[in-house]
Image: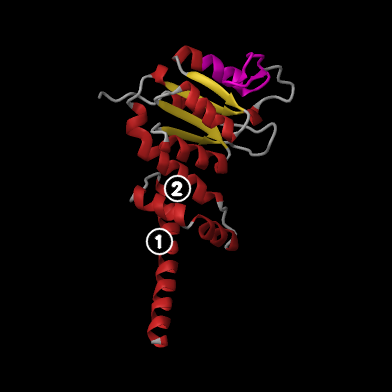
Amino acid sequence: MLEAVGRIVIFLALAFVVLIALALIVCALALHTKRILFPNFLLFVTSVLYEPLRRLLSFFHVDPTLIDRVSIEIRNLLNYTEFSATKMEERVLLLPQCIRSTECPAKLSPLDGIHCMECGKCAISELSTICKELGIRMYISPGGTFAGRILMHSRPKAVIGVACYPNLHEGMLNAKLMGVPAQGVPLTTTGCVNTTVDREEIIRRCKLLQISK
């Protein structure tokens, strides 16, 4: 009996190692070729084995955000068709307050977040102007919980979210639970203040071509 249990444990351990190895290989290929194979399977594995994969990468001195980058790209890919079928005016761009200038004069509304005054002191001003041209509503959230409140209040058909990896993972999951297809854009530098974003990537996500229904 004990021998059988031991064999089962060894088998499960080997299967676990193989699964992690396969996930890492597919993640590496995805970043190298810009093509994601078996996206649903890979998203499931990276979600379930998130911490073990990050620790293993750190152990081998590989940037652990590789897992985060692949996970976000998979979610973007899976949401692409539904997202791109929405009209511009049905979309919202949700930005984090950490990209604001420390001299930002904007005020916080308890209903829909921070109202940009387009002072030109940070990237938000340019994004605000572009969103107005496209007809996309833009919101600046002071926190993750507030972001959910904004989505409940604005009721968009699609959302482009910008945040650090942990908040982006949580936000895209919450959007999915709300039935709102999301496109995620991670911050290029992280922190609580003076973070930076890839403005061109945000604009590209905002302008994803619509697909005829």
* Label of residue 30 in the image: none
Q: Is 100 inside the magenta-drawn segment? A: no
Please tell me whether mark 2 sits on a helix, a strand or a loop.
helix
Residue 19 percent coordinates (x, y)? 41, 63
Alpha-carbon span between mark 1 and mark 2: 14 Å
- Which is nearer the eye, 149 or 206? 149
Residue at the (68%, 17%) spot, across then down: 106
Residue 136 percent coordinates (x, y)? 46, 18
The image quadrant of residue 157 is top left
Residue placed under numbered mark 1 in the picture: 22
Q: Are marks 1 and 2 in contact (CB under 8 Å)?
A: no
Please tell me whether mark 1 sits on a helix, a strand or a loop.
helix
Any part of residue 37 in sight: no
Residue at the (51%, 37%) spot, across then down: 171
Residue 165 drawn above or below residue 209:
below
Any part of residue 60 in sight: yes
Residue at the (33%, 23%) spot, across then down: 210
Quarter of the image for the C terminus: give it: top left
Give the amino acid type for the residue marked by disc 1 in the picture.
Answer: Leu
In the image, 115: left or right of 136?
right
* Numbered range of the magenta stretch: 107-130
Give the amino acid type for the residue marked by disc 2 in the picture.
Answer: Leu
- Which is nearer the eye, 12 or 18? 12
Residue 177 percent coordinates (x, y)? 42, 38
* Label of residue 31 in the image: 2
Residue 141 percent coordinates (x, y)? 59, 27
Q: Is 117 inside the magenta-drawn segment? A: yes
- Residue furthest to the left in view is 213
